Image (cartoon, coloured by chain):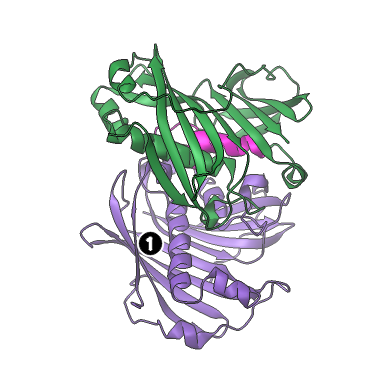
Chain colours: A purple, B green
C-alpha cells in the first residue's frame, strides 16, 4: 500500500469561520480523521490499538497555511509517517488545492498509551516504519513553547458536556477553538494565522475550571497556556502575519 | 429528480459524545449539510438564493431519536420537502441504519430572508412544491415553546470567534451544544434525549452577553431560552427519557 494516504474533501459551510475561510480547528478535525483512516488502512489504527489494550494520543500538532481554502473548494489532504522511534510517531500532512498546489503543511507527534494505566507504551516501530517515507514536509517541527501559565488572570472556562471526546476528555479540537477564542475578532479581520502549534500535556476532564493565558512574546507571536490549578495541561503558540 | 435525497455517512469519532453515541448537535450539522445539498441539487440551494439576493435561515428544528448510532456505523440520512407556503418551507428528515431501519426523524422550518434587509422574503413556492412529497415523518411538528427567559439567574456566556458562522452570526449548531451543556453529565449517563426542539428567533452576534435559562416544566421535559438583555434570541425544549 502507498505510504501516502490521500483524503480529498469539500470545504462545506460548517468548516468555515466568519470570514469564509477554512478554520484552523476545522482543519484540525480533518487532520485527525485522515490520520485515523490512514493508520486504520495500514494495520495500526484505533481498532488495532484497542486489541493491544492501547490507544493513540495526540501529543503535538503544528499547522502552517499560506492560503486558506473557501466554500465549496475541493481540497486534497495527504498524510504519511515520517518515522517512529521510542515512544513517539511523527506524522506529516500536506493540504493542497484541486490542482495539487500546496496550501500548507502540518506536523504531528503521537504517543501510544496503555488503556488501563494511561501511561505511554512502546510502539510497534517496525510496523510503523514499514510505511515510513522521505516525502518533504517543509515546516518547522513542533518545539518547546515557553510557559505563560504563571501570568496573572487568564480567561476562565469550565469543561462541559460538548467539550468531551469519546474518551470523556477535553476534546483536542475544542481546545484549539477555545485558544483562538482568546483573540479579538479584529485580529482575525486584519491578520491571518501563519502558524498554529499546540502541545497537549495532560487530559482535561468534565467540570475542570481552566484558565487560558496568553502573552505576545515577539511581534505577532503569542505563547499560550491552558491551566488547571496553576499547572498547564496544554501549551500553544500562534503566529499571526 | 427524486424528491427524496439520500445522504449516507459514517459515524466517525468527531461526531460522538463521551458515551460514544452520535451527538444531537453533530446530527444537527449533518441535517444542515443534507438540506443544503438536497436544495442545491434541485435549484433552490444557497447559491441559487444568493442570485436572488436571499438566503435560507433555519427557523425551527425538532429531532426525535429512538436509537443512537455509534462509532463506524454506516447510516442513511434522507431528506425531503413536506411543503412550502407563505414565508416558510417545511423540510423533513429520516435517519436510518444501513438496513433501512429508522433510528429517528427530524422536522425543520426554514424562511428565506433578503440579504440586505435580513427580513423574510417570499419563497418561490411553486419551485419548492414541485418536489413536495407525502412521505410520512411520524414526529410532532415544532410548536410553541413556553418562555422561561423571565427566570432569575441563567448561565452566562459571551459569543466568541469559534461560535460564529460564515455570516458572522451565532452558529445554530453551537447554540445546540451550549443548550445541552446546561445539563449535568449525570443526566446524559442516566437518560437519553428523546426529543430536542429549537426555535431560532434572532441572530446572535460577536461579543453578545447571553444567559441560558432552563426549567423542568413537566417530568423530564425542560423548557429553555437563550437571552440577550432579557429578550429571548432562541427557545428550546429537551425531553429526556
Out of B161 and B107, give the one closest to the viewer: B107
A169 sits left or right of B96 in the view:
right
Residue positioned most to the top:
B86
Q: Is residue B225 visible?
A: yes
With A182 as the anchor, is A167 left or right in this view? Answer: right
Q: Residue at x 44, y 85 (%)?
A: A129
Q: Is residue A205 left or right of residue A110?
A: right
Using the rendered image of the protein, determine whether residue A219 is visible from the camera's viewpoint.
no
Residue at the (72%, 44%) spot, across then down: B188
In-front residue for pair B221/A30: B221
Name the residue furthest left: A99
Callout 1 secondary element: strand
x, y percentage for residue B175?
Answer: 56, 34
In the depicted structure, whether residue A83 falls above or below residue B173 = below
Q: Is residue B33 above or below residue A233?
A: above
- Specify the quadrant that holds the C terminus of chain B: top right
A92 inside magenta stretch? no
Q: Chain of mark 1?
A: A
Q: Which residues are magenta?
A: B162-181
Percent across and percent down for residue A204 are 67, 58
Percent of width and height locating residue A28 = 46, 57
Q: Residue furthest bottom?
A: A126
Residue toward you, A6 or A204 = A6
On the rendered structure, is B2 left or right of B197? left
For label 1, count other residues whose C-alpha is less than 10 Å away and answer few (under 14), some (14-19) or many (20+): many
Residue located 37% across and 19% down the image:
B113
Q: Does residue B179 show up magenta in the picture? A: yes
The number of discs equals 1
Whole-percent x, y for residue A85 in the image: 51, 85
Q: Which quarter of the rendered picture does the N terminus of chain B lie within? A: top left
Residue at x-position 49% and y-position 51% = B98
Residue under numbered circle 1: A64
Amino acid at each position: 500500500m502507498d505510504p501516502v494516504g490521500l483524503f480529498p474533501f469539500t470545504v462545506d459551510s460548517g468548516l468555515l469561520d466568519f470570514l469564509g475561510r477554512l478554520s484552523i480547528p476545522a482543519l484540525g478535525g480533518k487532520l485527525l480523521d485522515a490520520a485515523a483512516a490512514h493508520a486504520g488502512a495500514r494495520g495500526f489504527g484505533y481498532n488495532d490499538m484497542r486489541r493491544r489494550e492501547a490507544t493513540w494520543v495526540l501529543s503535538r500538532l503544528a499547522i502552517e497555511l499560506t492560503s486558506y481554502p473557501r466554500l465549496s473548494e475541493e481540497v486534497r489532504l495527504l498524510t504519511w509517517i515520517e518515522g517512529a522511534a521510542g515512544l513517539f510517531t511523527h506524522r506529516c500532512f500536506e493540504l493542497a488545492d484541486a490542482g495539487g498546489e500546496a496550501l500548507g503543511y502540518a506536523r504531528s507527534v503521537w504517543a501510544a498509551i496503555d488503556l488501563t494505566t494511561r501511561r505511554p507504551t512502546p510502539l510497534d516501530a517496525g510496523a510503523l516504519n514499514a510505511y515510513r517515507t522521505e516525502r518533504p514536509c517543509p515546516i518547522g517541527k513542533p518545539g518547546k513553547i515557553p510557559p505563560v501559565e504563571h501570568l496573572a488572570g487568564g480567561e476562565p472556562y469550565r469543561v462541559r458536556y460538548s467539550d468531551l471526546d469519546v474518551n470523556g476528555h477535553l476534546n483536542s479540537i475544542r481546545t484549539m477553538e477555545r485558544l483562538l477564542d482568546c483573540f479579538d475578532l479584529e485580529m482575525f479581520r486584519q491578520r491571518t494565522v501563519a502558524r498554529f502549534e499546540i502541545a497537549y500535556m495532560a487530559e482535561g476532564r468534565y467540570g475542570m475550571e481552566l484558565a487560558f493565558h496568553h502573552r505576545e512574546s515577539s511581534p505577532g507571536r503569542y505563547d499560550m497556556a491552558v491551566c488547571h490549578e496553576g499547572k498547564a495541561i496544554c501549551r500553544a503558540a500562534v503566529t499571526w502575519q
